[in-house]
Image (cartoon, rainbow, N blue to C red):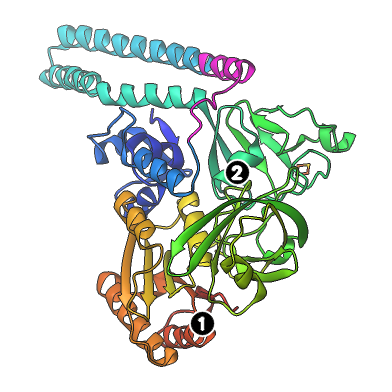
Amino acid sequence: MAQLISLSRAARLVGVKRATLQKQIREGELHTFEGELDLSELLKVYPKTDLDGSGMVERADRIIENAFGKVLDTKDLPDAEVLATRVTLLSHELGTARARVNRFNKLVSRISDKLDSLEQAVGDPAVKAFRQWLESEIDEVQSAQGLHDEVLATDTFMRLLAAHVQLKPSGHDFFLNGSETLLHAGLRSGMQLRYGCTDGSCGRCRAKVISGEAKRVRAYPECLSEDELAAGYVTLCAHTAMTDVLLQVDEVIRPEEIESQVLPATLRRVDDLGQGMVGLVVNPVEPHRLQFLSGQSARIRIGDAAASYPIASCPCDETQVEFHINTADDNPLAARVAAGLDDVETLDLEGPRGDFVLNLESVHSLVFIAWDREFASIKSLIEQALALDVAEQIYIYWVTTDGSRPYLHNLCRAWQDAIDNVNYTRLEADPAVYGERAREVVGDTLAELAGQHYNVKVFDFYIGGPETVTEASRKYLVARGVPPAQVRTRHD
Ligand code: FES
């Protein structure tokens, strides 16, 4: 009987990105059975699976985590109750599997005995040939078990540490480590989950448990009604997954579904990014969180100085928000940042704003084009795309018009070096009329992509830059056959 495993679990086991397996499924190299992969077929395609935990995905994940400024929390292990539940569940599965194997072993043995007696009774060479064939097949199956068994053992161990969470109706999924909350694990994985208070009082993060078991890990007062509780609803911010779970949940699709918030924040870090760019990393004051979608903006107020800037971080780290301020900008906030922030501890955030967000319904590869210092929103989009791991290929083009190196050139290089489906290209353009240059640069981009893929319709384009550039780029792309819905700009 085929051993089926989910795509996300398969990607973790053989050490490739989920998008790589999706590509192989599309190209017919792998086959799915009700959305899952046959482990034996997977191991035929990946016969050199590295099970020592040093696979590409693990390395890439570590570098992504570091690039996001996060620290891997190796202490985030399941608590005793969660572990006991998972061990019990796996023990039950193991017992069932053992009983089934015993039954099959007995059946094979009976068939073998039957063939023996038939061979002696009738002396038919066909019976003898069939018995020999059966024995060689049994030997082959047994000798091929080594890697298969090791992979299954690794999968079982990983299931103890991390639960697999699937969302309905979107089909999105993620892993929940240790006993972290469903909300935290989902956001960390790039999901666009609804939430508000994060302290169990608003009920906005409610979800229905369709299968599996969730457990309350935060002692917040219950905000759901008796009827909701009886129907299996839980709050994601207060619960963890005891086992693999299937949740029915409304994810945020459109930016207007998020209410604008005004909240206090503290200044955590000021980074000199070079070329007059300053990175501000701020923490919303507990229990506030700034809910936003990647690519959106927020208004920053420091004293009397205020201005809107794109958010440069991923919503997958909901505890901090990053901005890139060009100190040459003509607004009071940029002047305040340029004057120094040594005396600043608190500030206000208002947002989110803007429609320049990822299309999570799309299965296309992604092309990001940033012009000069308009990289912040592109960075946020790229980080969410990396966290989600759904794009087959990610192309990043960063165009500068003053001969300087892009101010986060090294970060883009690090992504390209660490993650096998990320491609980064630095482009230079003369300080000429932006509209004309946009057409030329986008033309180069398309020529390069078309050379590899023949069809530019398989890409979604996200373009950050001055409005003249983004509009010229959009017209160029649409005129060459890219559907208008697949071109998004920061000025939409
Ligand atoms: S976010 Fe308010 S109850 Fe979970």
In the rendered image, residue 14, in percent from the top left (x then y), is placed at 33, 37
**Residue at image point 13% right, 16% down:** 128
Mark 1: secondary structure: loop
Quadrant for the N terminus, please.
top left
Q: Furthest-right residue in view?
A: 226
Whether residue 184 sits left or right of residue 12 in the image: it is: right
Q: On the rendered structure, is 281 left or right of 67?
A: right
Q: Which residues are magenta?
A: 72-91
* The image quarter in which residue 100 lies: top left
Q: Is residue 81 magenta?
A: yes
Q: Residue 355, can we see it? A: no
> The disc labelled 2 sits on which kind of residue?
Gly
Pointer 1 residue:
466
Instruction: Give SS at disc 2.
Output: helix
Which is closer to the viewer, label 1 or label 2?
1
* Displayed quadrant of residue 97: top left
Whether residue 300 is visible to the viewer of this picture, yes or no, is yes
- Image quadrant in which the C terminus is located: bottom right
Who's the residue at 34% across and 53% down the image?
414
Q: Main secondary structure of the magenta part?
A: helix
Vertical relation: 214 (above or below) 446: above
Q: Percent x, y for residue 386?
A: 45, 53
Q: Earlier in the sequence, mark 1 or mark 2?
A: 2
> Is the CB atom of the residue marked by disc 1 within 8 angstroms of ligand 1's nearest atom?
no
* Disc 1 residue crowd, few under 14, some 14–19, many 20+, Cα 10 Å: some
Q: Which mark is residue 186?
A: 2
Residue type at mark 1 is Pro
Name the side, left or right, on which 55 lies relative to 487: left
In this view, the residue in front, 210 or 2, is 210
Q: Would you place residue 477 above or below residue 309 in this image?
A: below
Pick whichever, 181 or 334, lies toward us: 334
